[in-house]
Amino acid sequence: MTTLRFVQVDAFADRPFTGNPAAVMPLDRWLDDSLLQAIAAENNLAETAFFVGGGGRYDLRWFTPAVEVDLCGHATLASAHALWQERLLGEHDAARFHTRSGLLTAERQGEWIELDFPDQVAEAIDAPDGLLEALGVREPIWVGRNPMDYLVEIGSEELLEALRPDHSRLRTMTARGVIVTSRGTGEYDFVSRFFAPGSGIDEDPVTGSSHCALAPYWAPRLGKTEFLAYQASPRGGVLRVRLAGDRVKLGGRAVTVLRGELVA
């Protein structure tokens, strides 16, 4: 029997039960991949983050209930939040995460945490067969793809909120997921939703990594490099996004909602 401590954190959230939940599990050493995947499936959250390390340097991995992924923003934010909240890292110290996507850092800025991620620029493509039909999109403004995801711009925030995709059809798409975005209204520069049924998540509540594509996409269209963004899922979440060369700075808040032990 192995007993593992964990916390559950709502990331990109300023109050419980909003934003995107992630389980965060510090480990003394790496367990078998099959066990990590089984734990993530048992948690049944969009992501479970596991890390090994100390002193501000950590090896970090992310698992959905179905697969290990190469990049995850909300579970990185949750991991950084947990390090400070559980007093595993000094409150003024930065966290350095070594991941499949290289070095990612997190720094505290008052109530906010800012992550430093690589950009994921999408290139224009013709929409693959079935993509727009699966989304229920008739007249996209733009369709593109980066190494992880498809990116589709549509005409309005109202159309975005009204989308009811066919997740069984999206599951056949050869990508991690599909980002759908539009210009924002009111205080938000742009809004988005993210669908990834092929990765075990029909709709992700708030997706930090999708903004690594959205920041370089919207910068030339809006004529700016700093944005306030909203992910318009049922739980919803706000992100401060800043494009800095080939890096994207992702700002968010987080709250701990659960502490416990898992026996495996």
Image (tube, rainbow, N blue to C red):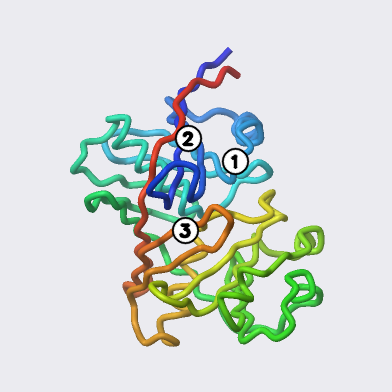
Residue 85 placement, left or right of 72: left
Residue 63 in the image, given as x and y percentages of width and height? 58, 43
Q: Which amino acid does label 3 sit on?
A: Gly
Closer to us: 26 or 152: 152
> Measured from the top left, where is residue 39 in percent x and y?
61, 30
Q: How crowded is mark 1: few (under 14 residues within 10 Å), some or many (20 or more)?
A: some
User: Which structural element holds mark 1?
Assistant: loop
Taking the image as shown, residue 246 lies to the left or right of residue 260, namely left
Q: Circle 2 is placed at which residue position?
A: 8
Query: Label 2's element?
Result: strand
- Mark closest to the chain's N terminus, 1 or 3: 1
Residue in the image at 51% along x and 55% along y:
71
Disc 1 versus disc 2: distance between alpha carbons?
9 Å
In the depicted structure, whether residue 67 falls above or below residue 133: above
Q: Are marks 1 and 2 in contact (CB under 8 Å)?
A: yes
* Residue 225 point in image, percent of width and height: 34, 78
What residue lies at 70% left-to-right and 84% top-to-bottom? 126
Residue at image mark 3 = 208
Identify which amino acid the numbered label 1 is placed on.
Leu
Query: In the rendered view, does 161 fall on the left or right side of 98?
Result: right
Q: Distance between the residues labelled 1 and 3?
A: 15 Å
Q: Residues within 10 Å of mark 3 (few under 14, many from 20)?
A: many
Q: Is residue 159 above or below residue 82?
A: below
Q: x%, y% of residue 240?
A: 35, 64
In the image: residue 230, left or right of residue 38: left
| Residue type marked 2 | Gln
- Identify residue for label 1: 45
Residue found farthest to the left: 92
Q: Is mark 3 on a helix, strand or loop?
A: loop
Disc nearer the start of the sequence (3/2): 2
